[in-house]
Image (cartoon, rainbow, N blue to C red):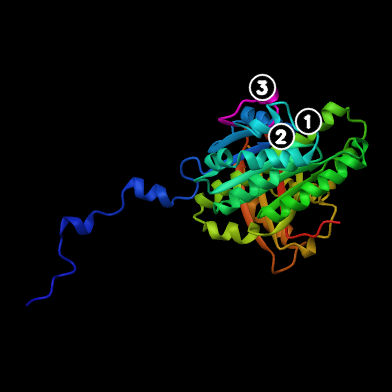
Amino acid sequence: MSKEDPYSERSDDFRGTTEDELEQYAVGSGSSIRIFGMGGGGSNTINRLYREKIPGVDLIACNTDANHLLRIKAKGKVLLGENLTKGQGAGGDPRIGEEAAHESEKDLLGKIKGAEIVFITAGLGGGTGTGSAYFAAKVAKEQGALTFGVVTLPFESEGKRRMRKAVWGLKKLIASCDCVIVIPNEKLLTVAPDLPVDAAFREADEVIVKAIRAITEILSYTRLINLDMRDLEEVVRNSGAAVIGIGYGTGDYGERVRHAVKDAIASPFLDLDLSSATGVLINISAADPTIDETNIATEEVKKLIADRAKIIMGTGIEKSLEPKIQVTLIVTGLKLP
Protein backbone atom coordinates (compact mmCIF):
# COMPACT_ATOMS: atom_id res chain seq x y z
CA MET A 1 0.00 0.00 0.00
CA SER A 2 1.52 3.29 -1.09
CA LYS A 3 1.97 6.09 1.38
CA GLU A 4 -0.12 9.22 0.93
CA ASP A 5 1.82 11.99 -0.78
CA PRO A 6 2.17 14.79 1.82
CA TYR A 7 2.59 17.31 -0.99
CA SER A 8 -0.57 16.46 -2.87
CA GLU A 9 -2.72 19.50 -3.72
CA ARG A 10 -5.80 18.60 -1.74
CA SER A 11 -7.94 21.65 -1.10
CA ASP A 12 -8.23 21.05 2.66
CA ASP A 13 -4.42 21.17 3.01
CA PHE A 14 -4.44 24.72 1.67
CA ARG A 15 -7.33 26.05 3.73
CA GLY A 16 -4.92 28.19 5.75
CA THR A 17 -6.12 30.33 8.64
CA THR A 18 -9.24 32.45 8.45
CA GLU A 19 -9.34 36.14 9.44
CA ASP A 20 -11.57 35.28 12.41
CA GLU A 21 -9.07 32.71 13.63
CA LEU A 22 -6.17 35.15 13.26
CA GLU A 23 -8.03 37.79 15.27
CA GLN A 24 -8.27 35.39 18.20
CA TYR A 25 -4.48 35.48 18.47
CA ALA A 26 -3.67 39.00 17.28
CA VAL A 27 -2.31 41.40 19.89
CA GLY A 28 -4.63 44.34 20.40
CA SER A 29 -7.33 43.04 18.06
CA GLY A 30 -10.83 44.26 18.73
CA SER A 31 -11.29 46.02 22.06
CA SER A 32 -8.49 44.32 23.97
CA ILE A 33 -7.25 47.48 25.73
CA ARG A 34 -9.61 48.78 28.41
CA ILE A 35 -9.19 51.73 30.71
CA PHE A 36 -11.10 51.81 34.00
CA GLY A 37 -11.52 55.09 35.85
CA MET A 38 -12.24 54.28 39.49
CA GLY A 39 -13.98 56.85 41.71
CA GLY A 40 -14.40 60.56 41.06
CA GLY A 41 -10.81 61.31 40.06
CA GLY A 42 -10.52 58.24 37.86
CA SER A 43 -13.84 58.99 36.16
CA ASN A 44 -12.72 62.55 35.46
CA THR A 45 -9.66 61.10 33.73
CA ILE A 46 -11.99 58.99 31.59
CA ASN A 47 -13.71 62.20 30.47
CA ARG A 48 -10.34 63.63 29.46
CA LEU A 49 -9.36 60.45 27.61
CA TYR A 50 -12.71 60.52 25.80
CA ARG A 51 -11.85 63.98 24.43
CA GLU A 52 -8.35 62.76 23.46
CA LYS A 53 -9.88 60.04 21.25
CA ILE A 54 -7.07 57.53 21.77
CA PRO A 55 -7.65 54.82 19.14
CA GLY A 56 -8.17 51.18 20.02
CA VAL A 57 -9.22 51.54 23.65
CA ASP A 58 -12.49 51.15 25.54
CA LEU A 59 -13.22 53.57 28.37
CA ILE A 60 -15.15 52.43 31.45
CA ALA A 61 -16.09 54.73 34.35
CA CYS A 62 -16.78 53.18 37.77
CA ASN A 63 -18.09 55.14 40.75
CA THR A 64 -20.40 54.96 43.75
CA ASP A 65 -21.75 58.45 42.96
CA ALA A 66 -24.57 58.14 40.41
CA ASN A 67 -24.83 61.89 39.74
CA HIS A 68 -21.13 62.14 38.94
CA LEU A 69 -21.27 59.04 36.75
CA LEU A 70 -24.05 60.62 34.66
CA ARG A 71 -21.69 63.46 33.70
CA ILE A 72 -18.97 61.12 32.40
CA LYS A 73 -18.61 60.21 28.73
CA ALA A 74 -17.54 56.57 28.42
CA LYS A 75 -18.32 53.45 26.44
CA GLY A 76 -19.23 51.63 29.66
CA LYS A 77 -20.20 52.60 33.19
CA VAL A 78 -20.50 50.69 36.45
CA LEU A 79 -22.36 52.04 39.47
CA LEU A 80 -20.37 50.38 42.25
CA GLY A 81 -22.17 49.09 45.34
CA GLU A 82 -25.66 49.93 44.19
CA ASN A 83 -27.25 48.26 47.22
CA LEU A 84 -24.60 49.52 49.64
CA THR A 85 -24.41 53.21 48.74
CA LYS A 86 -27.65 53.75 46.78
CA GLY A 87 -25.63 55.84 44.34
CA GLN A 88 -24.74 58.42 47.00
CA GLY A 89 -20.96 57.92 47.08
CA ALA A 90 -18.53 56.46 49.62
CA GLY A 91 -18.22 59.50 51.88
CA GLY A 92 -14.43 59.48 51.59
CA ASP A 93 -14.19 56.05 53.25
CA PRO A 94 -12.00 53.54 51.34
CA ARG A 95 -13.62 50.65 53.21
CA ILE A 96 -16.97 51.56 51.64
CA GLY A 97 -15.29 51.88 48.24
CA GLU A 98 -13.74 48.45 48.74
CA GLU A 99 -17.03 46.86 49.81
CA ALA A 100 -18.85 48.50 46.90
CA ALA A 101 -16.35 47.00 44.45
CA HIS A 102 -16.83 43.56 46.00
CA GLU A 103 -20.59 43.91 45.58
CA SER A 104 -20.14 44.81 41.91
CA GLU A 105 -17.59 42.10 41.12
CA LYS A 106 -19.78 40.50 38.43
CA ASP A 107 -20.28 43.86 36.69
CA LEU A 108 -16.54 44.55 36.76
CA LEU A 109 -15.77 41.06 35.49
CA GLY A 110 -18.22 41.54 32.62
CA LYS A 111 -16.40 44.70 31.52
CA ILE A 112 -12.92 43.18 31.97
CA LYS A 113 -13.43 39.76 30.38
CA GLY A 114 -11.57 39.36 27.09
CA ALA A 115 -9.19 42.28 27.65
CA GLU A 116 -5.49 41.72 27.01
CA ILE A 117 -4.40 44.95 28.67
CA VAL A 118 -6.21 46.79 31.46
CA PHE A 119 -5.43 50.21 32.88
CA ILE A 120 -6.78 51.16 36.31
CA THR A 121 -6.65 54.88 37.00
CA ALA A 122 -7.64 56.69 40.19
CA GLY A 123 -6.86 59.62 42.40
CA LEU A 124 -5.83 57.98 45.68
CA GLY A 125 -6.81 59.41 49.04
CA GLY A 126 -10.59 59.49 48.73
CA GLY A 127 -13.13 56.74 49.27
CA THR A 128 -14.24 55.03 46.08
CA GLY A 129 -11.05 55.19 44.00
CA THR A 130 -8.78 54.26 46.89
CA GLY A 131 -10.91 51.32 47.99
CA SER A 132 -11.98 49.94 44.61
CA ALA A 133 -8.91 50.39 42.36
CA TYR A 134 -6.94 47.45 43.74
CA PHE A 135 -10.00 45.18 43.58
CA ALA A 136 -10.63 45.97 39.90
CA ALA A 137 -6.92 45.34 39.22
CA LYS A 138 -7.11 42.01 41.05
CA VAL A 139 -10.07 40.91 38.91
CA ALA A 140 -8.24 41.96 35.73
CA LYS A 141 -5.06 40.14 36.65
CA GLU A 142 -6.98 36.99 37.55
CA GLN A 143 -8.40 37.10 34.01
CA GLY A 144 -4.86 37.07 32.64
CA ALA A 145 -4.76 40.70 31.49
CA LEU A 146 -1.53 42.69 31.66
CA THR A 147 -2.60 45.16 34.34
CA PHE A 148 -1.36 48.73 34.76
CA GLY A 149 -2.26 51.12 37.55
CA VAL A 150 -1.89 54.86 36.87
CA VAL A 151 -2.60 56.83 40.03
CA THR A 152 -1.98 60.15 41.74
CA LEU A 153 -1.05 60.78 45.37
CA PRO A 154 -2.57 63.81 47.15
CA PHE A 155 -1.05 67.26 47.57
CA GLU A 156 0.38 67.80 51.06
CA SER A 157 -2.18 70.57 51.56
CA GLU A 158 -4.92 67.91 51.42
CA GLY A 159 -3.80 66.65 54.82
CA LYS A 160 -2.02 63.70 56.43
CA ARG A 161 -5.17 61.63 56.83
CA ARG A 162 -5.83 61.71 53.08
CA MET A 163 -2.21 60.77 52.40
CA ARG A 164 -2.42 57.82 54.82
CA LYS A 165 -5.48 56.55 52.99
CA ALA A 166 -3.68 57.00 49.67
CA VAL A 167 -0.64 55.01 50.84
CA TRP A 168 -2.95 52.22 52.06
CA GLY A 169 -4.60 52.09 48.64
CA LEU A 170 -1.28 52.27 46.80
CA LYS A 171 0.19 49.31 48.67
CA LYS A 172 -2.84 47.19 47.85
CA LEU A 173 -2.78 48.32 44.23
CA ILE A 174 0.91 47.49 43.76
CA ALA A 175 0.19 44.01 45.15
CA SER A 176 -2.67 43.58 42.64
CA CYS A 177 -1.17 45.07 39.44
CA ASP A 178 1.72 44.15 37.18
CA CYS A 179 2.94 47.74 37.11
CA VAL A 180 1.76 50.90 38.88
CA ILE A 181 2.78 54.34 37.63
CA VAL A 182 2.78 56.64 40.65
CA ILE A 183 2.31 60.39 40.17
CA PRO A 184 2.79 62.42 43.39
CA ASN A 185 0.77 65.61 42.88
CA GLU A 186 3.12 67.52 45.18
CA LYS A 187 5.89 67.15 42.58
CA LEU A 188 3.88 69.35 40.22
CA LEU A 189 4.48 72.28 42.55
CA THR A 190 8.24 72.08 42.05
CA VAL A 191 7.61 72.94 38.40
CA ALA A 192 4.81 75.49 38.86
CA PRO A 193 4.53 76.54 42.54
CA ASP A 194 1.96 79.27 41.81
CA LEU A 195 -0.46 76.96 40.03
CA PRO A 196 -4.11 77.52 41.11
CA VAL A 197 -5.74 74.48 42.72
CA ASP A 198 -8.05 73.62 39.81
CA ALA A 199 -5.20 74.04 37.31
CA ALA A 200 -2.97 71.79 39.44
CA PHE A 201 -5.53 68.98 39.34
CA ARG A 202 -5.91 69.41 35.58
CA GLU A 203 -2.13 69.22 35.22
CA ALA A 204 -2.04 65.98 37.24
CA ASP A 205 -4.78 64.61 34.98
CA GLU A 206 -2.69 65.57 31.95
CA VAL A 207 0.24 63.50 33.24
CA ILE A 208 -2.05 60.47 33.63
CA VAL A 209 -3.36 60.90 30.09
CA LYS A 210 0.17 61.16 28.68
CA ALA A 211 1.24 58.03 30.55
CA ILE A 212 -1.66 56.02 29.16
CA ARG A 213 -1.21 57.42 25.66
CA ALA A 214 2.51 56.58 25.75
CA ILE A 215 1.85 52.95 26.65
CA THR A 216 -0.88 52.52 24.02
CA GLU A 217 1.44 54.02 21.38
CA ILE A 218 4.23 51.68 22.47
CA LEU A 219 1.80 48.77 22.05
CA SER A 220 0.95 49.95 18.53
CA TYR A 221 4.63 50.38 17.68
CA THR A 222 5.56 46.90 18.93
CA ARG A 223 2.97 45.49 16.55
CA LEU A 224 4.31 47.66 13.71
CA ILE A 225 7.88 46.34 14.08
CA ASN A 226 6.66 42.83 14.88
CA LEU A 227 8.02 42.83 18.42
CA ASP A 228 6.76 39.94 20.50
CA MET A 229 4.17 40.89 23.11
CA ARG A 230 6.19 38.81 25.56
CA ASP A 231 8.99 41.39 25.33
CA LEU A 232 6.67 44.05 26.68
CA GLU A 233 5.38 41.69 29.35
CA GLU A 234 8.95 40.98 30.43
CA VAL A 235 9.41 44.67 31.28
CA VAL A 236 6.13 45.28 33.09
CA ARG A 237 4.85 41.94 34.39
CA ASN A 238 5.04 42.00 38.21
CA SER A 239 7.42 44.98 38.08
CA GLY A 240 5.75 46.84 40.97
CA ALA A 241 5.99 50.63 41.15
CA ALA A 242 7.04 52.75 38.18
CA VAL A 243 7.70 56.45 37.63
CA ILE A 244 7.22 58.70 34.62
CA GLY A 245 9.22 61.52 33.10
CA ILE A 246 8.02 63.71 30.23
CA GLY A 247 10.37 66.02 28.31
CA TYR A 248 10.34 68.26 25.25
CA GLY A 249 13.01 69.35 22.78
CA THR A 250 13.34 71.62 19.76
CA GLY A 251 16.04 72.24 17.17
CA ASP A 252 17.74 69.98 14.66
CA TYR A 253 16.55 66.37 14.52
CA GLY A 254 19.43 64.85 16.43
CA GLU A 255 19.63 67.60 19.02
CA ARG A 256 15.92 67.97 19.75
CA VAL A 257 15.55 64.37 20.87
CA ARG A 258 18.66 64.60 23.08
CA HIS A 259 17.22 67.72 24.72
CA ALA A 260 13.87 65.97 25.20
CA VAL A 261 15.48 62.94 26.87
CA LYS A 262 17.43 65.21 29.24
CA ASP A 263 14.26 67.16 29.99
CA ALA A 264 12.35 63.94 30.74
CA ILE A 265 15.11 62.71 33.06
CA ALA A 266 15.07 66.08 34.85
CA SER A 267 11.33 65.70 35.45
CA PRO A 268 10.41 66.00 39.15
CA PHE A 269 8.64 62.63 38.93
CA LEU A 270 11.95 60.96 37.99
CA ASP A 271 13.86 62.24 41.01
CA LEU A 272 15.33 58.77 41.66
CA ASP A 273 18.46 56.75 40.90
CA LEU A 274 17.70 55.10 37.55
CA SER A 275 20.60 52.64 37.78
CA SER A 276 18.40 50.21 39.74
CA ALA A 277 15.67 50.16 37.06
CA THR A 278 14.75 46.80 35.57
CA GLY A 279 13.07 48.23 32.49
CA VAL A 280 12.29 51.44 30.61
CA LEU A 281 9.45 52.15 28.21
CA ILE A 282 10.42 55.01 25.86
CA ASN A 283 7.85 56.75 23.69
CA ILE A 284 8.61 59.51 21.20
CA SER A 285 5.83 61.76 19.92
CA ALA A 286 6.27 64.35 17.19
CA ALA A 287 4.70 65.55 13.97
CA ASP A 288 7.38 63.61 12.09
CA PRO A 289 9.43 61.28 14.34
CA THR A 290 12.30 59.47 12.62
CA ILE A 291 13.92 56.08 13.13
CA ASP A 292 17.21 57.85 13.82
CA GLU A 293 15.59 59.77 16.69
CA THR A 294 14.32 56.56 18.27
CA ASN A 295 17.87 55.17 18.13
CA ILE A 296 19.36 58.32 19.67
CA ALA A 297 16.78 58.30 22.49
CA THR A 298 17.55 54.65 23.24
CA GLU A 299 21.30 55.29 23.36
CA GLU A 300 20.86 58.30 25.67
CA VAL A 301 18.75 56.27 28.12
CA LYS A 302 21.18 53.33 28.03
CA LYS A 303 23.87 55.60 29.50
CA LEU A 304 21.81 55.95 32.69
CA ILE A 305 20.55 52.45 33.38
CA ALA A 306 22.09 49.07 34.16
CA ASP A 307 23.04 46.75 31.29
CA ARG A 308 20.51 44.20 32.51
CA ALA A 309 17.59 46.64 32.17
CA LYS A 310 15.36 46.03 29.16
CA ILE A 311 14.18 48.85 26.90
CA ILE A 312 10.96 48.88 24.87
CA MET A 313 10.54 51.66 22.31
CA GLY A 314 7.49 53.29 20.75
CA THR A 315 6.57 56.27 18.59
CA GLY A 316 3.44 58.28 17.98
CA ILE A 317 2.55 60.96 15.43
CA GLU A 318 1.15 64.11 17.03
CA LYS A 319 0.89 67.00 14.60
CA SER A 320 0.09 69.52 17.35
CA LEU A 321 3.63 69.17 18.76
CA GLU A 322 5.30 70.70 15.66
CA PRO A 323 8.17 71.72 15.80
CA LYS A 324 8.78 70.07 19.20
CA ILE A 325 9.40 66.44 20.05
CA GLN A 326 8.08 64.82 23.23
CA VAL A 327 9.84 61.95 25.00
CA THR A 328 8.00 59.96 27.67
CA LEU A 329 9.99 57.61 29.90
CA ILE A 330 8.25 55.03 32.08
CA VAL A 331 10.82 53.45 34.37
CA THR A 332 9.94 50.16 36.06
CA GLY A 333 11.38 48.13 38.92
CA LEU A 334 12.39 51.09 41.08
CA LYS A 335 12.04 51.16 44.84
CA LEU A 336 10.05 54.20 45.87
CA PRO A 337 11.16 56.17 48.96
Front residue of 218/26: it is: 26
- Which of the two marks, 1 or 2, is nearer to us in this view? 2
Q: Residue at x 15, y 64 (%)?
A: 8
Report the amino acid beneath label 2.
Answer: Gly
Report the amino acid beneath label 3.
Answer: Arg
| SS for dot 2 | helix
Instruction: Reply above or below: 310 against 143.
Output: below
Which mark sits nearer the N-terminus, 1 or 2? 2
State the CA–CA distance, disc 1 to disc 2. Answer: 16 Å
> Splitting the image into 4 quarters, where does residue 111 fall?
top right
Residue 143: percent from the left, percent from the top?
54, 51
Residue 200 counted in the magenta span: no
Left or right placement of residue 69 versus residue 306 in this view: left
Left or right placement of residue 12 versus residue 159 in this view: left
| SS for dot 3 | loop
> Splitting the image into 4 quarters, where does residue 332 fall?
bottom right
Residue count near mark 2 (Cα–Cα under 10 Å), binned few <14, some 14–19, many ≥20? many
| SS for dot 1 | helix
- Label 1 sits on residue: 202
Please, which residue is most extreme toward the left here? 1
Q: Which mark is residue 39?
A: 2
Report the amino acid beneath label 1.
Answer: Arg
Which mark sits nearer the N-terminus, 1 or 3? 3
Please, which residue is most extreme toward the front here? 83
Residue 231 showing in the rendered view: yes
